[in-house]
Amino acid sequence: MDFSIKSGHPEKQRSACIIVGVFEPRRLSAAAEQLDAVSQSYLSNIIRRGDIEGKSGQTLLLHNVPNTLCDRVLLIGCGKEREFNEAAYCQALATAARTVNENGAMDAVNFLPELPVKGREVYWKVRQAVETTESALYLFDELKTDKDKTRRPLRKMILSVPSRRDLSRAEQALKEGAGIATGVAVARRLGNLPPNICTPSYLAEQAVDLGKSSDKLTVKVLEQSDMEELGMGSLLSVAKGSRQPPKLICMEYRGADKDSKPYVFVGKGITFDSGGISIKPSPAMDEMKFDMCGAASVIGLMHTVVELQLPLNVVVIVPTCENMPDGLAVKPGDIVTSMSGQTIEILNTDAEGRLILCDALTYSERFNPETVVDVATLTGACVIALGNHATGLLGNHRGLTHDLLSAGKSSGDRAWELPLWDDYQEQLKSNFADMANVGGREAGTITAACFLSRFTKKLHWAHLDIAGTAWKSGNEKGATGRPVPLMTQFLLDKVK
């Protein structure tokens, strides 16, 4: 999508479609009132007949509105004005994008960013307009043979801002929103690809390809033999049951001087999770291709970092393999030695994400990081606790968790902090090893983070459990690209 910024009157816009809002009950927004005035009450006469009430989600497409230069005017229901918040604004944007895209207009001027959203200024509204529009129009059809080649998709959108004084901030918002949208699209595509295509080797190839696009980015892929030399017995134990070779992908971006400590992101990359010997039930097992969405999100983040040319040092680490049952697969009761030297009794082979992450977290120490954030579809318990609205957040450094929570609120990609108290560590006790890899049913998200915390004592570290936010099920099944917006905002805040 080609986005641009403009400030002007709606009746003077020569476009295939002008997008304006209508509040409930039948109340025109400021831009709609301008169109109504020049068209001699054409809009108000129509809505007075009851064609649109202004309820959220409603649309009305008008053609040949008198005294305007546009082919169409699209009225978007925005609900009650006093209740028009961030969620309602984003819903209006998504509805507008889909409606225009389905009605043959290849370009549009969108006046929704001029609507008042409580507590939000022009920068936020423009950035959300870019991100939400791209997300609403995202389509994964590359593996379908029957594609609609006759569609006239929306290709160009101008975002209108109230004043010329807003243009500079709006341009910055557009740039950053487009960069985030790129990262989200990459993460969604990788997550949506089937596991027979998106293997650990495929993820490594995507990282290497990105590395070729920027002289600031260096990509290194560790093979099984390299990991054996490093003593990554925990990570390698998960990969034993698969014919797909494991990889440890390391992407190092240098946007600042070499003395600046990097911000490190570690993404869980289980490209298919059968549960191993502790095999999962068959219903919805196909969705276990999404168990690499942590990896997809940090790779997407690096696309965003490269596109925005952030003046920071950023490192992305992806431990990736399959978790499959096999005669060589790790068994419940096995004890493995991690890269840190700590031993782990594996009570459940379906708690494998923490086993690959712990070695990657130990590996991250060599970069002398400013902070380390791991991102993982780690626990079903997080879905039960928070649903699909908020990402679970736990960490060992108050400043870091505060910054991530703030970034989530600012970006709209929200997280919620759970406690990481020492009381929960008791559940990981083992009679035979330094720790067990599970701590029972109670507080499963917290005990998983407690496990990881044992490998991050030298780090300022936080853990993002995206099990509930990384993908959707049902009719809208597919990866969401979260938490790319949250992580990008965290880095943008460091720049600012």
Image (cartoon, grey):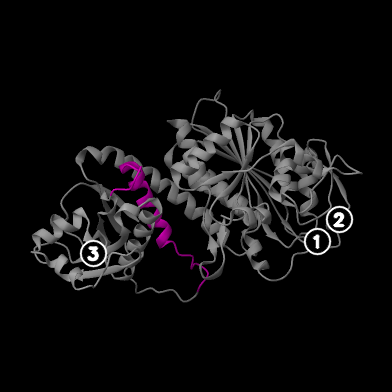
Quarter of the figure with residue 51: bottom left
The picture places residue 300, in percent across and down from the top left corner, at: 52, 49
Is there any visible trace of residue 259 in the rendered image?
A: yes
Seen at 42% across and 46% down, the residue is 179
Task: Find residue 202 and report its horizontal and vertical position in percent.
Answer: 62, 56
- Which residue lies under the disc numbered 3? 26
* Residue holding disc 1: 278
Residue, disc 2: 332
Q: Is residue 320 left or right of residue 432?
A: left
Disc 1 residue type?
Ser
Identify the element where label 3 is drawn. Answer: loop
171 and 445: which is toward the camera: 445
**Callout 2 environment at 10 Å: few (<14), some (14 to 19), or many (20+)?**
some
Q: Is residue 390 above or below residue 167?
A: below
- Residue 455's image quarter? top right
Q: Secondary structure at mark 2?
A: loop
What SS does tag 1 mark?
Answer: loop
